[in-house]
Amino acid sequence: MKYLLTLIAGLLLFTSCKDDKKDDNSSICQRTLICYVCGDNNLSSDAKENITSLILQGSKEIGKDNMIVVVVDNQKTNPTLIHVRNGEYTKSEPYETDFYMTDPEKMRQILTYIMNEYKSNSYALLLWGHSTGWMMERDTIAYANTRGYGPDNIGETGSGINKWINYTAMANVFSQLPAKFDVIIGDVCLLQCVEIAYELRNYTNYIVGAPSEVPGYGLPYDSVIKYMFGSSEEDYKVLANAIYNNTKGSYQVPTSVVKTSALEDLRQATLSLVKSGKLEAEHCNFNDVIYYFRFEGCPIMYDMQNIMLKNLDEGSYTEWKKAFDNAVVYRVAGSQWNTLYPSIFNDFTVSEENYGGLSMFVPNTVYNTMYTYKPNDDIRHYEWNIWNNE
């Protein structure tokens, strides 16, 4: 993906030829944006040289009461923590050894250090890298993490073993941090799954991201960084709209804003439909329902609102939709989106009625034949799971 990687590359070059500037962290700032960049993988080659100045320019627009702290692991470098303020880096702290940034304990240590070192009234977290949503991947390597966010590598060439962190483990990391995030922003694919949102509900107030793929070049940081420093629901709607309208390429990226405090009501509303038999997993109709990705040829990431519209009677849908709209407070999408599979994801009718901007998994026996992924089993690891409540 990613523009931020170019920023880091440029800053690391700067640190090799001059001393760090003095960094005064004694004052408490209004907002600190923590950019957690897993770049020691195949995304490293996507960096573009001419983006560095745009990112630095973007940081000039956030105000002197805010700051950006970037922690990045890139090929041929150890993980490095960089403080960016007013268009300039003021501090660079390379770690002495390489390590997996997707290791839960390392993630906890890094985020705790940043929150303690850079005191702030509020924190935003930007997740930058790959993501396969809530799906988990088994690996023949015993110490490989199940899939979710990442991956990270070690060594100069990135030729080692990629390791991921799943979102259940990430939630456990967040539960140990000194502060709660006000917003988590995803520059990753498939973040906006209801399973992930519910898992992270206690550790952030809002989540902004895409239910679909995000193109390799990532978010348009030069245009949207300034919107990552808002503090209200309306501000995050503006951010989502800016991401959608400024995304480069032929098509925009579907983007939504989830209000986590409303997710418990959404779960209860959905669970009641399952318990009453109005929503039966094995009898769900998925004909013409929007979905955001396939695994092993099987559509899995179906749009939650579209599922309900297709399968519920009018009265049940209207009542359920109230809970959904309270949780997904903003969503925007076009009839097509930027994807590696244009022949698949270019024929949906996307409208306000059937597009919800949040996916949901529905178990089905068809998934039992999958070789690598076992979603019918893996869904049980998530707190959202409404399908197996014995």
Image (cartoon, grey):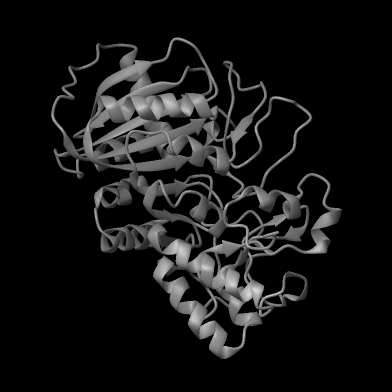
* Residue at figure coordinates x 36%, y 23% from the top left: 81
369 lies left or right of 63:
right
6 vs 21, left or right, is: right
Is 17 above or below relative to 11?
above
Of 172 and 285, nearer the camera is 172
Q: Residue at x 53, y 45 (%)?
A: 216
In which quarter of the view is residue 110 placed? top left
One can see residue 347 in this view: no
What residue do we see at 50% from left, 25% from top? 105
**Percent of width and height locating residue 247:** 42, 56
- Name the one closer to the observer, 330 or 254: 330
Q: Is residue 232 left or right of residue 220?
A: left
Q: Residue furthest bottom?
A: 314
Q: Position of residue 333 (x, y in %)?
A: 47, 68
> Which image quadrant is residue 96 in?
top left
Expressed as whole percent of the image width and height from the top left, the position of residue 282 reads 77, 71
- Left or right position of 374 against 80: right
To which quarter of the image does residue 66 belong? Answer: top left
Residue at image coords 60%, 42%: 148
